[in-house]
């Protein structure tokens, strides 16, 4: 598996207790007990936006979420899903701004940190991704998506370190063996 395939294996977050999945369908419960935020928005236009996002019509979903947010700027679901739509449209800087804004306004939500981390991984910023994922896990230790992503980031960091060692000391057979083993574990080709 190459680096892009590893990236594809990393998961975007879902919102807590059945909130909208990053690319999925919401559960219809009244409150997310852990966070005190609405789970299923009653704002007009959310059903349309959710359907568009589920159908991967990201341009239309983005426009729908923006209409919802014009009427209710604190709609956490619409804000989160707007970030997902922006990221899906490769409007990465805007997606980062959307997720960072959520971390400031709703600092107890781990999902925006997870999604920020995935963008940082795509940009090659493994240290920044690790930081964001550690925050997500600190906020919710049982957040399996973030825990799995953190493990993958650690493996990518180990690979990067071993690659540096083998470039700096080509005769270091121990590092070369570990790199081959790690690449085999990741399903990647050796450099």
Image: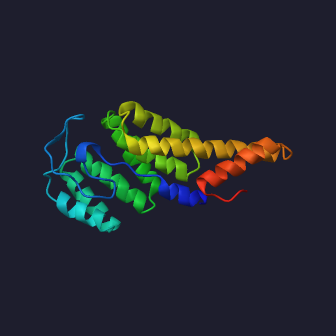
Where, quadrant-wise, is the C terminus in this rendering? bottom right
Q: Give the x, y percent position of residue 101.
A: 36, 41
Q: Residue furthest top?
A: 138
Is 187 located above or below residue 36 in the figure?
below
Residue sitting at x 23%, y 64%: 51
Is 134 located above or below residue 51 in the figure?
above
Q: Give the x, y percent position of residue 111.
A: 36, 43
Residue sitting at x 26%, y 52%: 20
Q: Give the x, y percent position of residue 69.
A: 23, 52
Residue sitting at x 34%, y 54%: 22
Residue placed most toward the observer, 185 or 160? 185
Q: Residue furthest right?
A: 171
Residue placed most toward the observer, 147 or 125? 147
Residue placed most toward the observer, 128 or 13? 13
Lateral position of residue 141 relative to residue 165, left or right? left
Is 150 located above or below residue 51 in the figure?
above
Is 35 located above or below residue 9 in the figure?
above
Q: Give the x, y percent position of residue 135.
A: 43, 33
């Amino acid at each position: 598996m190459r680096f892009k395939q590893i990236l594809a294996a990393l998961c975007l977050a879902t919102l807590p207790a059945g909130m909208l999945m990053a690319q999925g369908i919401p559960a219809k419960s009244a409150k997310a007990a852990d966070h005190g935020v609405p789970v299923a928005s009653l704002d007009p236009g959310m059903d349309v936006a959710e359907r568009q996002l589920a159908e991967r019509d990201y341009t239309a979903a983005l426009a729908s979420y923006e209409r919802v947010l014009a009427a209710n700027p604190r709609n956490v679901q619409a804000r989160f899903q707007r970030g997902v739509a922006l990221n899906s449209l490769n409007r990465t800087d805007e997606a980062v701004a959307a997720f960072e804004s959520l971390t400031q306004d709703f600092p107890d939500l781990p999902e925006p940190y997870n999604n920020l981390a995935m963008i940082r991984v795509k940009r090659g910023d493994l240290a920044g991704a690790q930081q964001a994922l550690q925050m997500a896990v600190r906020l919710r230790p049982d957040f399996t998506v973030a825990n799995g992503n953190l493990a993958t980031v650690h493996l990518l960091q180990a690979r990067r370190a071993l690659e540096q060692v083998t470039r700096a000391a080509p005769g270091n057979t121990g590092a070369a063996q570990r790199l081959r083993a790690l690449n085999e574990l990741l399903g990647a080709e050796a450099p």
